[in-house]
Amino acid sequence: MNKHVIDRLRRLMRIATGGLRRVHGDQRGTISIFTVFALLMFTMILIMIVNIGRHVDDKVKMQNAADAATYSGGVVLARGMNGVAFTNHLLCDVFAITAYLREGRDRNAEQMIPEILQAWNEAGEIFSTAQFEKFRRLGPAIIDKVPKEQEAVTAFGEMTAASSEFALPVFEHILGPPSQTPDLDEDGSGDGPLNPGEDDSGLSEGDDQFAGGQSGHLIPEFQRAMVRMIPEMAQEVTREIARRHGMPRGEETGSQGYLSQTSRGEQSGALWRTTVETVGYSNEDDPLRRTLPVIDPDPNEGDLYVPSIEEYRDESRNRRRILARAYLQGWNNQKLSLFRAEAKMSQFFNLWVTATCAQLNRLLEEEYRDTNLPMMLRRTDDNRNVERIISDAETVIGQDGRRVRMDRRTDRGFEFVNNRVRSSFSTVDDYIERDFNFVGVVSRRQLAEMGPGLFKNPIEQRSDAHTFAQVSIFIPRPRYYLWYVGRGQSGQAGAESFDLGGTFGFDSELNTPARPGQSGIPNPGQPPAEEDQRWIHENWPANWDLFNQNWTVKLVPATAQNMLDILQRHPAGESTDLIRPYFRQVTGRDLKSLNNH
């Protein structure tokens, strides 16, 4: 080989070897290579952390939306129950005031007063001639009081008659035409002969100033309309609350600078019954399927095929009679307080009470026996009333063989009764879940992933995002609260009593002193002595029926037996194309183990 070529090759090899040696020994720019890989790795970690945070935040917000929407829908249903209970009381009160005003119109009791007062006048004359001085002085006092009592009775009668003439047609219009009108004759039965063109309700022909037409049973009609509309209102409230929780900030007020929608799309909500029926879309005229668990015992309505409807009707009549009499007694005691205390000689109060009770009995037992009946709470599948079940569970046999009722207002009694209810009556839990528990589901598109090429939601193609919550409508249990019982400076017991605040839980023990509290006022800044404290029971009704206006709602663990079916179904009336989850081999037990409720 040419010596020149060989020398050139050797020179190139020396240059290459030297270059490699310099590259291996020169560390300039090495950090840039590591920086590229480190930035790539940290970027991926950052995207992963942001994704996790967004998903957690999205889940929390959706759960808040589900809780708020479900609770709001439950509040509407609870108010509906309270509305039915209120109108039940209103119906009984209308009967009471109608009886009161009818007696004011007829003035039957007033007609007997002159004869009674004349007897008192004669008695006063006899007393005036008595030899005993106190009796002799009593005679003129009786004679002097007789015309005053007659004047008071006459004035009250004229005032009540005037009020009756003005108000009675209104209340009789509310009750509507009687279902059957007794024969009226001249022998004293009934109200006497009717005027030409006048019916027994007190309205003359052509007297259509109320509602522009024929009278109707207005309160039951209002109740039936409310039973139909309340579920729709609850469903609409649930949707609206869910929608508002999914709105981007500023959209509701129309503020600029925010996107009108997010990538998740619109958020929707639905309220479900635990029977897998959407609230407000079932047949609300069906007494066994309607959302509000009420039964209308009126024989002219559509609840006739309910099992044991006669028992509902008898119970409704009985409760109506008890409440109407109580309201009538309240009216009489308040309006005739003068004749109960100062003007008792005429016996006008007792005669008036007797006459108004007769008017009420005629209204309840003859004219409106089968109409204007209060609505009743739907019973269990074995046709048992919840209050009857609780009453049976509270009743035990004492050592002397007598039936003793446990006090469920105390902690131990409450636990004892609950255990007996659950162990003795297996239908109670199903009844409570079916008629008084509701499930809310909030849905929207799955949250878009950041870095979709690196991270992917494995269920995005099979289901959209869903959260759910459950509420229960119930009657709250009265509690005890701490009260100071003492004597004021006047020495009168209870003069300085006041609320100390605070309640105890279900596991607390009562420690109520047996003897009365000591006199004196607790020192400022120091708690009262133990003997001056009492646990006072809150005074509100706890009966589980439609005469209790304390229905309320609470969030409960979402453990409905049909939860899987609810989550997989599209709610009635929903127009969205959201994808519902499909649980192939998932059981209710599996869902409960994964459920964070």
Image (cartoon, grey):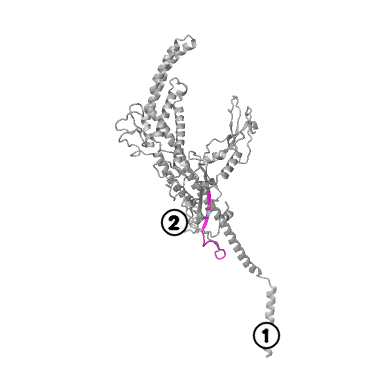
Type of amino acid under label 2: Ser
Q: How many marks?
A: 2
Q: Is residue 8 left or right of residue 170?
A: right
> With 26 as the anchor, is 588 left or right in this view?
left
Residue 560: x %, y % from top left: 53, 51
Residue visible at 43% across and 14% down?
123
Categorize mark 1 by other alpha carbons within 10 Å: few (<14), some (14-19), many (20+). Answer: few
Q: Looking at the image, which is closer to me, 432 or 504? A: 432
Asked if 55 appears above or below 556 in the picture, the reply is: below
Residue at the farthest bottom position: 1
Task: Specify whether residue 332 is in view.
Answer: yes
Q: Which residue is mark 2?
A: 575
Query: Taking the image as drawn, is residue 83 in sight?
Result: no
Question: How dense is the environment of label 2, judged by Cα within 10 Å: few (below 14), some, or many (20 and up)?
Answer: few
Q: Residue furthest top?
A: 131
Distance in Å between CA atoms under marks 1 and 2: 82 Å
Query: Between disc 1 and disc 2, whose residue precedes?
Result: 1
Q: Mark 1: which secondary structure?
A: helix
* Residue drawn at (34%, 30%) of the image: 184
- Residue at label 1? 9
Residue 3, compared with residue 472, is above or below; it is below
Magenta segment, principal secondary structure? loop
Expressed as whole percent of the image width and height from the top left, the position of residue 413 reads 59, 39
Q: Which residues are magenta?
A: 452-470
Q: Which corner quadrant of the image does residue 51 belong to?
A: bottom right
Is 469 one of the magenta-colored residues?
yes
Q: Assign the N terminus to one quadrant of the image.
A: bottom right
Foreground disc of the pair 1, 2: 2
Nearer to us in this view, 448 or 315:
315
